[in-house]
Image (cartoon, helix red, strand yellow):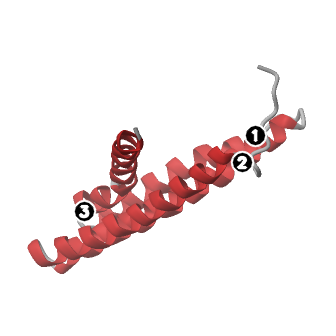
Amino acid sequence: MDEEVDLLTDESYAELRLSHRRILVLMTIAGASGAMAGAVLVNPRFGLGVLTGSILALANYFWQRRSMRRIFEKAARGEKPFFPAFAYILRYAVLGAVVWFCYVTDALPVIAVVAGLATFAMAIVIEGLIGIFSSRADR
């Protein structure tokens, strides 16, 4: 259990990087296709709302990733990660403020923005399905 794994040479690290890239690509595809479908099927404002939510989802993804990395780096050095943990939580307030702003000003349909924010969840589900079916194909 005390074995150290060198992530730069481990085979699973390559799979992890592929999965990370694929999630970003899937998020982008889901956001773009959702925005186009919303613009065509509902109205252009709805499509813009989905696109805005998708961009927020991508920003949230990178913000969370950076915050988590900083938290673990500080914890590994034995420091208390107060500020990175604060930044991790602050992203929820920022996302909530943007959604609230859209709701209060009626700048964009809130349902469309929330649908765009869901592109991350859609990408994770698709990535999971890819993992399930590719592992079956390897057998």
Label 1 or label 3, whichever comes before in sequence order: 1
Tell me the residue that label 1 is attached to.
72
Tell me the residue that label 3 is attached to.
112
Badges 1 and 3: C-beta atoms under 8 Å apart?
no
Give the numbered dot on residue 69.
2
Horizontal side, residue 59 vs residue 38: left or right? right
Give the amino acid type for the residue marked by disc 3 in the picture.
Answer: Ala
Q: Secondary structure at mark 2?
A: helix
Crowd rating for badge 2 (residues with CA inside 10 Å; few <14, some 14–19, many 20+): few
Seen at 67% across and 45% down, the residue is 68
Give the numbered dot on residue 37.
none
Give the amino acid type for the residue marked by disc 2 in the picture.
Answer: Arg
Horizontal side, residue 112 vs residue 122: left or right? left
Using the image, determine if residue 119 lies above or below residue 136.
below
Crowd rating for badge 3 (residues with CA inside 10 Å; few <14, some 14–19, many 20+): many
- C-alpha distance separating marks 1 and 2: 5 Å
Foreground pick, 92 / 107: 92
Visible in this render: residue 107? Answer: no
Give the amino acid type for the residue marked by disc 1 in the picture.
Answer: Phe
Using the image, determine if residue 82 lies above or below residue 124.
above
